[in-house]
C-alpha cells in the first residue's frame, strides 16, 4: 500500500508540474500575442498618419520615425510566429511589406538620361550664423560647387563667408541676411538676375535666376518654419504648401534647395516634391541618409528638390563644423 501511495503521490506531482508548464506556455503565448498586436497597432497608426498631411504637432514628430516601422512590424511577425498566431502573423507580414515598400524607392536611382551640363549644388543651414564659414568655403572649393544655398543666414555670417573667400569662388550672390534664423542666401558661379524675397513665409526664402550653358534656371534657397510648437506647425504646413504653389508657376528648370524641416515621410513634403518635381536624393537612390541633428542625425530635413527633367547623379551629406545640420551636396545633370 505504501508503494502505491508513493506512486500516486509522484504521479500527482508530475501532473501538477505538467499543468504548471502548460499554463506558463499559454501565458507566454498570450503575452507574445498582446505585444505583437500592440506593435501592429502602433505601426499601423504611424503608417496611417504618414499617408495623410496632419498638422497636429505630436503626429508630425512621430512621422519622423516612419523608416523604423519595419523593425517594429518585423518584431510582431516573430512574436506571432513564435506563439503560432496565424492571423496575427499574416497581418504583421502584410504590414511589414507595406512599411518597407514605401521606403524602397529611395534606394533605387531613377531619372532621365540627360546629356546637358553637370551642376554641383550645396545647401547648408548655418545655425543662426554660427557655422564655420571657412569650412563652408572649403567645401565649395573641394567639391567644385556651382550653386550655394544658405539658410539662417545672418549679416555676420555673410561677412565671415566673404572674409573666407566665397566671392572668389562664387562671385554672384543674392541674399536676405537677417538676425537669428530668418535669413537665406544664394551664391552662384554664373550671374544671378531677378533676385527677390518670397513673401508670406515664416522665414524669408530668396529666389533668383541664372543661365548655365544656355539653359535658364530658377534657384531658391528655402527654409520652412520648424514645427516645434502647435502654431509653428500650422505655419510649417502653410510654408510647404505655398512653396509648392510658387513652384508650379516656374517655366524654367528649377532647383529649390534648403531646410524643409520635413522628411520624405511627411505628406506635405511628398506633395511639394511630386511631379513635375522630385527630391534629388530619391532620384539618385541615395537611401535613408539623415541630416539633423548633425551630431547624431535622426531625420533628413535638408533637401535639394529639382524639376524632374534634371538627372540627380549623386546626393550626400557633408559635415560643417558648428552647424546643427549636415549640409547636402547634390551632383546634378541638366537636360
Image (cartoon, rainbow, N blue to C red):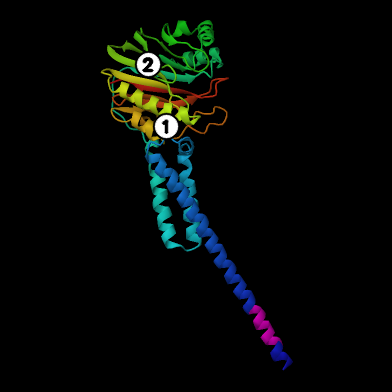
Q: Position of residue 131 (x, y in %)?
A: 55, 17
The residue nearer to you, when weighing 280 against 141, is 280
Q: Residues within 10 Å of mark 2 (few under 14, many from 20)?
A: few
- SS of the residue at dot 1? loop
Note whether 205 is above or below 302 in the view shown.
above
Residue under numbered circle 1: 286
Q: Position of residue 61 (x, y in %)?
A: 48, 36
Residue at (51% x, 24% y) in the render: 326
Q: Magenta segment, principal secondary structure?
A: helix
Q: Is residue 13 magenta?
A: yes
Report the quarter where the C terminus lies.
Answer: top left
Q: Position of residue 9 (x, y in %)?
A: 69, 84
Residue under numbered circle 2: 199
- SS of the residue at dot 2? loop
Quadrant position of residue 91: bottom left
How many numbered discs? 2
Magenta-tinted stretch: 6-14
Residue farthest to the bottom? 1
Residue at (52% x, 6% y) in the render: 159
The reply to whether residue 33 is visible in this rendering is yes
Amino acid at each position: 500500500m505504501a508503494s502505491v501511495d508513493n506512486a500516486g503521490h509522484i504521479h500527482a506531482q508530475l501532473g501538477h508540474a505538467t499543468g504548471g508548464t502548460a499554463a506558463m506556455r499559454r501565458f507566454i503565448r498570450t503575452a507574445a500575442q498582446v505585444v505583437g498586436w500592440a506593435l501592429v497597432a502602433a505601426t499601423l497608426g504611424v503608417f496611417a498618419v504618414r499617408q495623410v498631411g496632419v498638422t497636429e504637432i505630436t503626429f508630425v514628430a512621430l512621422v519622423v520615425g516612419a523608416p523604423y516601422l519595419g523593425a517594429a512590424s518585423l518584431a510582431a511577425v516573430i512574436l506571432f510566429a513564435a506563439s503560432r498566431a496565424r492571423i496575427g502573423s499574416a497581418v504583421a507580414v502584410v504590414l511589414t511589406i507595406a512599411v518597407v515598400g514605401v521606403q524602397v524607392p529611395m534606394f533605387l536611382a531613377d531619372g532621365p538620361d540627360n546629356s546637358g551640363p553637370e551642376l554641383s549644388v550645396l545647401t547648408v543651414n548655418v545655425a543662426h550664423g554660427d557655422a564655420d564659414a571657412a569650412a563652408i568655403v572649403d567645401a565649395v572649393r573641394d567639391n567644385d560647387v556651382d550653386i550655394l544655398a544658405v539658410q539662417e543666414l545672418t549679416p555676420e555670417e555673410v561677412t565671415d563667408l566673404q572674409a573666407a573667400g566665397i566671392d572668389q569662388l562664387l562671385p554672384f550672390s543674392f541674399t536676405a541676411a537677417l538676425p537669428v534664423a530668418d535669413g537665406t542666401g544664394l551664391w552662384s558661379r554664373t550671374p544671378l538676375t531677378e533676385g527677390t524675397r518670397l513673401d508670406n513665409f515664416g522665414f524669408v526664402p530668396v529666389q533668383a535666376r541664372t543661365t548655365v550653358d544656355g539653359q535658364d534656371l530658377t534657384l531658391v534657397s528655402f527654409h520652412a518654419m520648424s514645427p516645434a510648437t502647435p502654431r509653428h506647425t500650422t505655419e510649417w504646413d502653410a510654408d510647404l504648401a505655398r512653396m509648392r504653389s510658387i513652384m508650379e508657376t516656374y517655366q524654367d528648370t528649377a532647383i529649390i534647395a534648403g531646410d524643409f524641416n520635413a522628411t520624405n515621410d511627411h505628406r506635405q513634403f511628398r506633395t511639394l516634391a511630386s511631379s513635375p518635381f522630385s527630391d534629388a536624393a530619391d532620384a539618385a537612390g541615395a537611401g535613408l541618409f539623415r541630416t539633423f541633428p548633425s551630431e547624431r542625425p535622426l531625420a533628413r530635413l535638408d533637401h535639394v528638390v529639382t524639376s524632374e527633367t534634371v538627372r540627380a547623379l549623386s546626393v550626400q551629406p557633408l559635415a560643417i563644423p558648428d552647424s546643427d545640420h549636415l549640409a547636402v551636396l547634390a551632383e546634378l545633370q541638366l537636360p
